Image (spheres, rainbow, N blue to C red):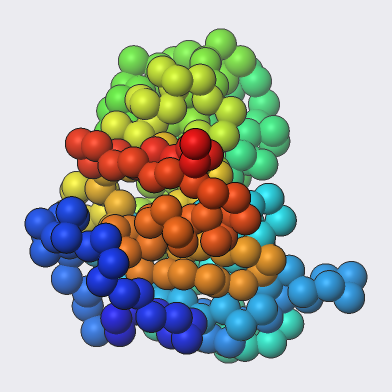
């Protein structure tokens, strides 16, 4: 495929149904925004990741899927420079990890993580939460925002459909609203790579659908950077996403275009259970085979 080098080859099985979609997938630039080569990540004498080879190119939107403990969060943290591999190399935005000051590179990587939500003060407003990111802070008090920064904060809130929440406190927002405000916080720094670690994990049906609609709108914007999304459910894959990785026991078992990867036999192999996979109007679904 030329997009990944795990030693697996995606065949043509099942492709006919989605051939028009495949032809419309974004064309990749020759230079990857993110490349992991022979990455191994070991903690407490146990490999959390091994033999990881993955390349993400401009215009691509990747999703990471796999059972609990497969290594999805470890991979996304390595991509965000919050962890470093035990072996292998990580190249991000043209720089090699370990040979660049990550304090300068990390602001160009937008990481949306549920862990951040637990650190935010409930009395902060949506606008304060978003604009504080411009100064790498969780609170606005040490870096008063300029009028221009506040205007940009409101623009990003509008971008995620939360413009009316600018003056609302974090404590009074729904879970779905909180996740979209955190997304606006991630976007305001204008990252060159966007990493999303299970943004829909705590959401109800309405909150999930609103978040997916927001991600689809953002993904369609011409200046949106490449995106990598971690999720447990194929139902949470936005319609605009283009590629997928299936992880199992710390290794990539399949990777490539969504229509090649999200086949029943491959998902069944990854999760160790017989699954039926559906596709309707750009959205995927999966359930145990009857």
In the rendered structure, the answer to whether residue 239 lies left or right of residue 191 reads: left
Residue 194: percent from left, percent from top: 41, 56
Residue 258: percent from left, percent from top: 32, 58
| Residue 278 in sight in this render | yes
Residue 279: percent from left, percent from top: 28, 42
Residue drawn at x 18%, y 55% as measured from the top left: 18
Give above or below for 101 relative to 143. Answer: below
Most foreground residue, 105 or 275: 275
Residue drawn at x 22%, y 74% as measured from the top left: 28
In the rendered structure, the answer to whether residue 138 lies left or right of residue 16 reads: right
In the rendered structure, the answer to whether residue 100 lies left or right of residue 214 reads: right
Q: Residue furthest right?
A: 44
Most foreground residue, 262 or 102: 262
| Residue 112 in sight in this render | no
Residue 39: percent from left, percent from top: 61, 82
Most foreground residue, 24 or 272: 272
Give above or below for 40 relative to 198. Answer: below
| Snapshot quadrant of residue 272 | bottom right
């Amino acid at each position: 495929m030329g997009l990944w080098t795990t030693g697996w080859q995606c065949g043509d099985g099942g492709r006919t149904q989605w051939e028009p979609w495949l032809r419309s997938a974004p064309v990749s630039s020759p230079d990857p925004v993110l490349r992991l080569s022979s990455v191994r990540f070991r903690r407490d004498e146990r490999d959390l990741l091994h033999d990881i080879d993955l390349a993400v190119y401009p215009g691509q939107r990747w999703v990471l899927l796999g059972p609990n403990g497969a290594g999805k969060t470890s991979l996304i943290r390595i991509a965000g420079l919050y962890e470093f591999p035990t072996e292998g190399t990580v190249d991000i935005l043209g720089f090699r990890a370990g040979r660049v000051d990550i304090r300068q590179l990390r602001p160009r990587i937008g990481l949306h993580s549920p862990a951040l939500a637990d650190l935010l003060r409930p009395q902060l407003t949506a606008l304060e939460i978003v604009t504080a990111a411009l100064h790498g802070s969780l609170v606005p008090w040490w870096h008063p925002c300029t009028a221009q920064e506040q205007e940009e904060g409101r623009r990003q809130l509008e971008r995620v459909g939360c413009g009316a929440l600018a003056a609302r406190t974090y404590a009074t927002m729904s879970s779905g609203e909180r996740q979209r405000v955190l997304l606006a916080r991630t976007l305001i720094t204008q990252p060159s790579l966007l990493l999303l670690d299970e943004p829909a994990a705590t959401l109800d049906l309405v909150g999930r659908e609103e978040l997916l609609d927001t991600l689809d709108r953002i993904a369609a914007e011409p200046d949106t950077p490449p995106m990598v999304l971690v999720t447990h459910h194929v139902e949470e894959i936005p319609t605009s996403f283009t590629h997928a990785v299936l992880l199992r026991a710390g290794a990539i078992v399949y990777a490539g275009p969504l229509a090649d990867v999200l086949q029943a036999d491959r998902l069944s192999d990854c999760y160790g259970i017989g699954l039926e996979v559906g596709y309707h109007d750009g959205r995927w679904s999966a359930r145990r085979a009857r």
